[in-house]
Image (cartoon, helix red, strand yellow):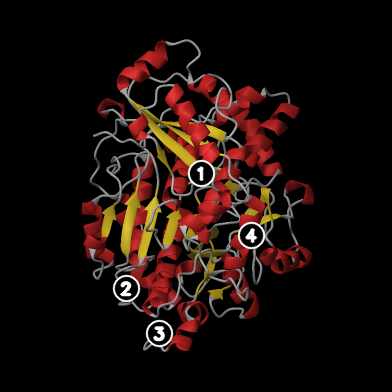
């Protein structure tokens, strides 16, 4: 099986990348315009009480705001033709922010033999209107990850008392509550071996969620995952959680890139950007998207190696070492992260609610301590000295979801999730500024909480995370799709009443949590983000960097996120 969305060449930041002379596509990501004005429109749409609240934009409206001009598109098109693109294959995205073309195998072979035609050189010769270039290669059968098809499901064996029904009872969600609007749509995404087993999903249904209609879950790409890979288990967990908690909402499982570099290395960031920009241009979008995968942010990785250099280590060796670590530094640069942020803004402006896992390494790591000799020892020392946030959950345009567990197995006593050397991710972004809707609560936390880590170890003015939390005994890859599914059911009720979806919902979450404490989210005041280090953020009443505003309370969610149903004569609100 071939996939056009498995690119082995990446946006280039240095040395030439060798690419084989076979059929492939080039994607020219064009420079975007009016981003400051677009950001203002985004926040107006997302801010409760603003006249433009929930007045989501169409792809055409966004294209007219940030898209390239006709002249810029023509320049990009002509350049592609000059290097051998198939003229009939050239396509402009609906948002006018990228131009894609196909290069047939014969042309690709000729280009590979010509001097100066590497992807790095092409990037240096690109037109001024092009920000960067991505190459997508057709994945050959023998290039797919060589892992076995595994039928056993450790996910089905390790829930213990944290069953779907017990978690729903803890949140007050009716066990038989399911979607009734056929247009409600939710999605999970991941690259590499990401996918799900239909057998596992049916077994999960039999064991935990008998009302789950497995026919409502389907792939939206030809890539359907590969059993045995890291992301295969991720995909199964994501699919089970979002399908169980967004019960019988139409669910899409998407894997747009099977390249091995996307599984654990810095090919992941490019795969995510490619997916988000393509998704934002679709005529029909999911109402909810959950992104469980991520790594340390590009800014965190830069800081690690900058600090390592101060201790006598080579920055190049540091960066190379980080690429040997599982899912630790998967974004190429802070500039790439900025472009991903814009793609997330576009999705929010179009009405998509995006949720992301807050990470599993507390406030210091991606997962846990580094392994592998002297460099690992140095990086562990640095990581415990500083708080190291992850991404994409630290984007200001995503709802960050932390993790909880139950003290002594009692579902009425939520505490911050921790275990296996890690714990619920949280802290403050090095790169992204704190949005204004966070100011009051975050300043209160920093001013009144004792036992905080050193001021020099984190950016107190950065985007604070997580926003909220759910059960995460299998990591925050469990809590993000779980929370996304819960919000899908809220949106389902809104759609039934002819109301718009919630789109970027974080400002509304913070407003409700501050004005109606304890009604929609239950505070989780026990825990600490230090994991294996000697400092971290303590939990506190209200918002904190471990579990955000806390765990869901269904009755309050319905009251405050579907409250305007009553203004439109809705016949029923399911509490």
Mark 3 / mark 1, whichever is N-terminal? 1
Residue at image mark 1? 97
Q: Residues within 10 Å of mark 2 (few under 14, many from 20)?
A: some
What residue is rendered at 38% in x and 43% in y?
231
Q: CA distance from mark 4 to mark 2?
A: 35 Å
**Whether residue 366 can be seen here:** no
Query: Where residue 204 sits: x, y (%)?
Result: 26, 60
Mark 3 / mark 2, whichever is N-terminal? 2
Mark 2 / mark 1, whichever is N-terminal? 1
Which is closer to the viewer, label 3 or label 2?
A: 2
Q: Do the CB atoms of the residues marked 3 and 1 lie less than 8 Å apart?
A: no
Mark 4 / mark 2, whichever is N-terminal? 2
Q: Residues within 10 Å of mark 3 (few under 14, many from 20)?
A: some
Residue at image mark 3? 573
Where 319 falls versus 185 (above or below)? above
Where 461 falls versus 483 (above or below)? above
Residue at image mark 4? 545
Q: Secondary structure at mark 2?
A: loop
Front one among 385 and 32? 32
Q: Secondary structure at mark 3?
A: loop
Q: Quadrant of residue 386?
A: top right
Q: CA distance from mark 3 to mark 1?
A: 41 Å
Q: CA distance from mark 4 to mark 1?
A: 35 Å
Residue at image mark 2? 181
What residue is rendered at 48% in x and 10% in y?
115
Q: Residues within 10 Å of mark 1 (few under 14, many from 20)?
A: many
Q: CA distance from mark 2 to mark 1?
A: 33 Å
Which is closer to the viewer, label 4 or label 2?
A: 2
Mark 4 / mark 1, whichever is N-terminal? 1
């Amino acid at each position: 099986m071939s996939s056009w969305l498995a690119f082995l060449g990446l946006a280039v930041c240095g040395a030439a990348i060798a690419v084989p002379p076979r059929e492939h596509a080039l994607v020219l990501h064009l420079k975007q315009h009016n981003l400051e004005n677009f950001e203002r429109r985004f926040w107006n749409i997302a801010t409760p009480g603003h006249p433009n609240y929930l007045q989501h934009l169409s792809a055409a409206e966004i294209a007219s705001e940030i898209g390239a001009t006709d002249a810029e598109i023509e320049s990009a098109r002509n350049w592609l033709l000059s290097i051998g693109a198939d003229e009939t294959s050239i396509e402009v995205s609906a948002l006018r922010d990228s131009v894609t073309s196909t290069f047939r195998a014969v042309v690709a072979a000729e280009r590979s033999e010509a001097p100066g035609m590497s992807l790095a050189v092409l990037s240096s010769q690109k037109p001024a209107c092009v920000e960067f270039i991505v190459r997508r290669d057709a994945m050959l059968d023998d290039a797919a990850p060589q892992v076995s098809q595994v039928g056993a499901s450790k996910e089905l064996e390790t829930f213990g008392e944290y069953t779907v029904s017990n978690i729903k009872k803890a949140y007050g969600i009716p066990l038989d509550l399911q979607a009734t609007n056929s247009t409600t749509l939710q999605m999970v995404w991941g690259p590499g071996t990401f996918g799900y087993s239909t057998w596992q999903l049916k077994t999960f249904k039999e064991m935990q969620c008998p009302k789950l209609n497995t026919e409502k879950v389907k792939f939206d790409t030809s890539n359907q995952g590969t059993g045995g890979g890291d992301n295969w288990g991720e995909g199964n967990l994501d699919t089970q959680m979002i399908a169980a908690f967004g019960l019988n909402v139409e669910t899409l499982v998407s894997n747009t890139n099977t390249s091995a570099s996307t599984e654990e290395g810095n090919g992941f960031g490019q795969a995510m950007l490619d997916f988000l920009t393509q998704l934002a241009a679709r005529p029909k979008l999911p109402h909810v998207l959950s992104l469980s995968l991520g790594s340390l942010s590009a800014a965190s990785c830069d800081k690690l190696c900058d600090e390592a250099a101060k201790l006598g280590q080579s920055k190049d060796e540091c960066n190379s070492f980080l690429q040997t670590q599982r899912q630790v530094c998967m974004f190429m640069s802070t500039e790439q992260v900025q472009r991903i942020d814009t793609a997330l803004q576009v999705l929010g402006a179009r009405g998509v609610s995006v949720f992301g896992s807050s990470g599993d390494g507390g406030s210091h790591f991606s997962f846990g301590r580094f392994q592998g000799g002297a460099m690992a020892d140095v990086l562990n020392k640095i990581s415990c000295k500083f708080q190291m946030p992850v991404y994409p959950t630290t984007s200001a345009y995503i709802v960050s979801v932390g993790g909880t567990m139950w003290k002594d197995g009692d579902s009425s006593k939520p505490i911050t999730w921790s275990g296996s050397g890690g714990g619920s991710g949280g802290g403050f972004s090095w790169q992204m500024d704190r949005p204004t809707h966070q100011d009051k609560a975050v300043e209160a936390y920093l001013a009144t909480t004792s036992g905080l880590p050193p001021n020099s170890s984190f950016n107190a003015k950065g985007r604070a995370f997580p926003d909220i939390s759910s059960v995460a005994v299998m990591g925050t890859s469990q809590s993000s799709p779980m929370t996304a599914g819960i919000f899908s059911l809220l949106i389902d009720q809104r759609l039934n009443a002819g109301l718009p979806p919630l789109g970027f919902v974080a400002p509304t979450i913070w407003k409700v949590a501050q004005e109606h404490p304890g009604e929609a989210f239950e505070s989780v005041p026990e825990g600490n983000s230090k994991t294996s280090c000697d400092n971290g953020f303590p939990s506190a009443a209200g918002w904190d960097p471990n579990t955000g505003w806390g765990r869901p309370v269904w009755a309050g969610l319905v009251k405050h996120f579907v409250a305007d149903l009553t203004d439109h004569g809705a016949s029923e609100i399911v509490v």
